[in-house]
Amino acid sequence: MPEPMTVAFPPAFRWGAATSAYQIEGAVREDGRTASIWDTFSHTPGKTAGGETGDTAVDHYHRYRDDVALMAELGLTAYRFSVSWPRVQPAGRGPALQRGLDFYRRLVDELLAHGIKPALTLYHWDLPQELEDAGGWPERDTAFRFAEYAQLVGEALGDRVEDWMTLNEPWCSAFLGYGSGVHAPGRTDHAATLRAAHHLNLGHGLATSALRTALPAGRNIAISLNSAVVRPLTQDPADLAAARRIDDLANGVFHGPILHGAYPESLFEATRAVTDWSYVLDGDVATINAPLDALGLNYYTPALVSAASAGAKVPRADGHGSSEHSPWPCATDIVFHQTPGERTQMGWTVDPTGLYDLIMRYSREAPGLPLYITENGAAYDDKPDPEGRVHDPERIAYLHGHLTEVRRALTDGADVRGYFLWSLLDNFEWAYGYEKRFGAVYVDYATLERTPKSSARWYGETARTGVLPPLPSI
């Protein structure tokens, strides 16, 4: 029997893990932090599993030194985290709160002291509640408030942090927050969804320009998109057209103006029933199309779609939470199908080929722009054994499969510079509360004790050697 092929990565490849502020920090009322939309949403009855909130989360705010030491022990070379907007600029307006910024200064200093490169995300969904009360992302002013916030953080941390991301997954902010309502702020208005998408784009462009003025030369600015891998059920023209329409709503609405300086005309045509796009003002798209230094891609599972049969009731199986409201404007005639294959605890199909397809697509969409996989991972029902060890061979297999596809993309010419596992720690998984565990490190939610799972050790060996270890026998 032939020996398995060694899967090796370039020496400079960056190995990291990712988290977000509301999911791990806790301390939601400490040091001047005010409420975000996720504080409000999670405290609204019926919005999260078991009524669970991020009030304590996994207490990273107080345990960050131990968490950084754990990253170093595992051999990680990078850490992607987000800044809590209401922690550093209460109410989303006015001067920065130094106590809030000081936490991130301490965190970054700790990372650098351990040889771990920080990658800072400005917005991972925790809009200050006061800005939502003023209309939220559907309002143009929110984009300008975001740019002001970006400037404050850039001035405070630009001397320490080289890698910056403006937004994480703006699709979720717009389409799940304002369309299906399964994410904060929980609104269900498709016209607001598309206005929010544009103003998120505008906020990204304005923030990019603000960061260029605030940061020292040589800093890198990117955005993390959860661009969908949309596949038609068949090659029938109707199914191909359905896939193109969802691709516009999932991808073109963001990468069109960000990368190419134009929204797809087909997007305007398809959504005319809910909006006239008159809020796209002269000069907006040029602002959004600000040059980037890298592009972050988040990937979990592909989408499989078809046109609905005439008169058929359209089920929702798009993998974005249970809701009677679809996140997809003007797409009631499109069916989402469960893709075949093994599934994670989220019900998402494990399909590493989708990550390869995504990388190669953006190698074509943005030639010459370095790519980072800024999120990829899986939730499983992890439990400690009687000795307190947490074995998760399914997650190891998931990582092995997806990293093999990253290496294949590198071989085929893609410029992928790094990979960030989602997530470092088990944490508050948004509307799912604490029932879905994505972490490579197990967290006992009663004691908050951290225990690296077998996948953390496996991934750490990968980070130290640049070579995928063999799969363990189950």
Image (tube, grey):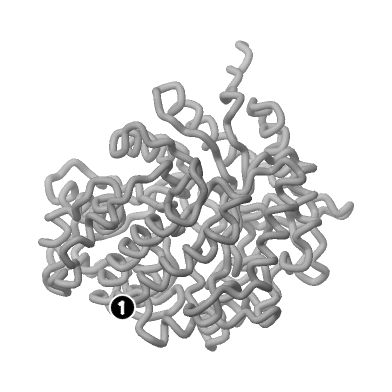
Query: Circle 1 — which element?
Result: loop
* Viewer-nearest residue: 6 or 79: 79
Q: Is residue 298 left or right of residue 120?
A: left
Q: Position of residue 325 (x, y in %)?
A: 33, 76
Asked if 183 appears above or below 296 in the picture, the reply is below
Asked if 382 appears above or below 406 in the picture, the reply is below
Q: Is residue 175 left or right of residue 411?
A: left
Q: Quadrant of residue 78?
A: top right
* Viewer-nearest residue: 227 or 305: 227
Asked if 32 appears above or below 289 in the picture, the reply is below
How many discs appear? 1
Q: Amino acid at mark 1?
A: Glu
For the C terminus, give its image quadrant. Answer: top right
**Residue at the spot x=53%, y=87% of the render?**
44
* Viewer-nearest residue: 227 or 79: 79
Q: Position of residue 85 (x, y in %)?
A: 53, 71
For the N terminus, give its image quadrant. Answer: top right
Q: Residues within 10 Å of mark 1 (few under 14, many from 20)?
A: some
**Residue at the spot x=49%, y=79% of the render?**
94
Q: Quadrant of residue 337?
A: bottom left
**Residue at the spot x=43%, y=28% of the render?**
409
Examine the rendering and report whether any part of residue 111 can be seen: yes
To which residue does mark 1 refer? 139
Residue lying at the far top in this picture: please name it.
2
Q: Position of residue 66 (x, y in %)?
A: 81, 56
